[in-house]
Image: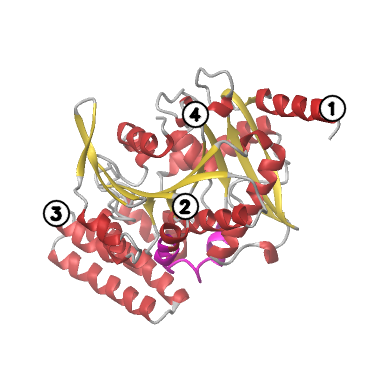
């Protein structure tokens, strides 16, 4: 390499390190765009550069956030409802993760949020396909932002993301080992995860009974529906088990008179149960896992925000309507929805050096903590006994008990107090502890 070329290469490297984003929606520098993960499949990302007082944003790690569904939008729900720099009403969020690290929201799988496909043939249908698309997204992202190749990368997720993130992390690690991509992948943390769906469903009845939200008759109805779901899962009748999951959800709604699936102590409208009667089973399932079943006013506000000011600010093509393909995205994954990925988590722990974690809010119903504990107990990895024998210790922040944690090998489980499904928003103090454990910042 000639001296001139070395000088140019050094200049470009320094420029990449010092390069800044652009003004976007909300405070701080940002960047966003599309990566064509396959012909006809366009995945959208939105990067927030950290607002921490540093000489270069590359001094802080990069955290990916993946939403659930499948079909829910990270750039919408995760960003404005949970951990982005501003909330749904445009107010600054003082616990935003962006204060401490760079955050990358990805609308995934294709068809979620601002991501879209040109034809129905280009949707993904399996968890493996989702993971491979995400690897392609990262190849495109690093090509546009090579300064992040050496920055520690941490994958965080929520809900159905608890199925997508482990396989994504595994495929990204293997791609890195094959020399297909440069990435400093360090950890993956699964938030209130749908990693083993049937374990979550089987936990609904016992949790609601013990909290006094249903009586024994209600418990019996929920348990009967949940056990039938388990039979269908055992027989690998995946489409039928997804439908029966919806039936079990309806038994919960009837017995509880409209409990909130994402936080059992959250206030709900007294006519919520009656309003559910007007929806088809398909609509109820879609609203629960893709629309996050927030109240209709907030749901309309978020859609208006994303399709209006956000789309205009980011220059989203007029033909792309935020969330317009999310229903189709969910529908096509019904064959995969109830499949567990415990074996993928086992492979992460035994075949990679990555740090793996699970955090779970104790007031979550849809991915109830007891069900999460049960599938963790089913994990079969080389250091399983070390984890089982480890003590559970308190998480104390400013002398307040915020939860508990238990670690063995490169795996940690976090119990989050006073939190439902959306732990980053419900208990930011506890989540700061989780972030520090995984990223060193928070």
Depth check, mark 3 against mark 2: the one in front is 2
Residue where numbered disc 3 is placed: 212
Q: Real-space Cα distance between discs 3 and 4?
A: 39 Å
Q: Quadrant of the C terminus?
A: top left
Secondary structure at numbered mark 3: loop
Residue 428 point in image, percent of width and height: 34, 33
Residue where numbered disc 4 is placed: 98
Residue 50 point in image, percent of width and height: 53, 26
Please state the extent of the stretch shown in magenta in the rendering: 326-346
301 displayed left or right of 19? left
Nearest to the observer: residue 7 or residue 282: 7
> Which residue is painted at 43% across and 26% down in the image?
93
Residue located farthest toward the bottom when viewing the structure as drawn: 235
Q: Real-space Cα distance between discs 2 and 4?
A: 21 Å
Q: Quadrant of residue 225?
A: bottom left
Vertical position of residue 89 compared to residue 389: above or below: above
Residue where numbered disc 2 is placed: 68
Q: Earlier in the sequence, mark 1 or mark 3?
A: 1
Residue 267 point in image, percent of width and height: 27, 41
Residue 138 point in image, percent of width and height: 63, 47
Residue 236 visible in the current orientation: yes
Label 2: how many Cα within 10 Å (few below 14, some 14–19, many 20+) = many
Secondary structure at numbered mark 4: helix
Q: Quadrant of residue 95?
A: top left
Label 4: how many Cα within 10 Å (few below 14, some 14–19, many 20+) = many
Depth check, mark 1 against mark 3: the one in front is 1
Is 339 part of what is drawn in magenta?
yes
Nearest to the observer: residue 367 or residue 90: 367
């Amino acid at each position: 390499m000639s001296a001139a070329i070395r000088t140019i290469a050094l200049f470009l490297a320094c420029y990449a390190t010092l390069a800044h984003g652009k003004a976007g929606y909300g405070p701080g520098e940002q960047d966003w765009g599309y990566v064509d993960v396959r012909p006809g499949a366009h995945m959208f990302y939105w990067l927030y550069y950290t607002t921490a007082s540093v000489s270069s944003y590359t001094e802080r790690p990069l955290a990916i956030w993946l939403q659930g569904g499948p079909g829910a939008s990270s750039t919408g729900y995760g960003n404005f409802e949970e951990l982005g720099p501003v909330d749904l009403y445009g107010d600054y969020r003082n616990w935003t993760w962006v204060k401490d690290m760079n955050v990358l929201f990805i609308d995934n799988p294709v068809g979620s949020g601002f991501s879209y496909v040109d034809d129905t043939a280009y949707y993904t249908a399996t968890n493996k396909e989702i993971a491979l698309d995400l690897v392609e997204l990262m190849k495109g992202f690093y090509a546009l932002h090579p300064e992040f190749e050496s920055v520690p990368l941490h994958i965080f997720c929520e809900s159905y993301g608890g199925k997508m993130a482990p396989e994504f992390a595994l495929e990204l690690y293997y791609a890195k080992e094959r020399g297909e991509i440069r990435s400093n992948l360090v950890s993956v943390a699964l938030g209130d995860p749908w990693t083993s769906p049937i374990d979550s469903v089987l936990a609904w009845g016992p949790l609601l009974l013990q909290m006094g939200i249903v009586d024994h008759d209600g418990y019996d109805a929920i348990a009967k529906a949940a056990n039938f779901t388990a039979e269908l899962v055992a027989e690998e009748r995946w489409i039928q088990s997804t439908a029966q999951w919806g039936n079990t959800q309806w038994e919960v709604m009837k017995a509880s008179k409209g409990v909130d699936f994402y936080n059992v102590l959250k206030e709900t409208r007294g006519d919520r149960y009656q309003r559910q009667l007007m929806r088809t089973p398909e609509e109820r399932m879609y609203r629960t896992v893709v629309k996050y079943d927030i109240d209709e006013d907030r749901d309309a506000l978020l859609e208006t925000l994303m399709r209006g000011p956000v789309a205009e600010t980011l220059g989203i093509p007029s033909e792309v309507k935020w969330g317009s393909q999310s229903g189709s995205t969910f529908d096509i994954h019904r064959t995969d929805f109830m499949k567990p990925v415990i074996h993928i988590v086992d492979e992460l722990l035994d075949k990679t050096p990555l740090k793996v974690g699970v955090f779970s809010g104790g007031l979550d119903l849809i991915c109830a903590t007891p069900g999460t504990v049960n599938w963790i107990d089913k994990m079969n990895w080389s250091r399983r006994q070390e984890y089982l024998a480890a003590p559970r210790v308190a998480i104390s922040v400013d002398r307040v008990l915020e939860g508990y944690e238990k670690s063995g090998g490169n795996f940690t489980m976090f119990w989050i107090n006073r939190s439902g499904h959306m732990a980053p928003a419900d208990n930011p103090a506890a989540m700061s502890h989780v972030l520090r454990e995984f990223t060193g910042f928070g």
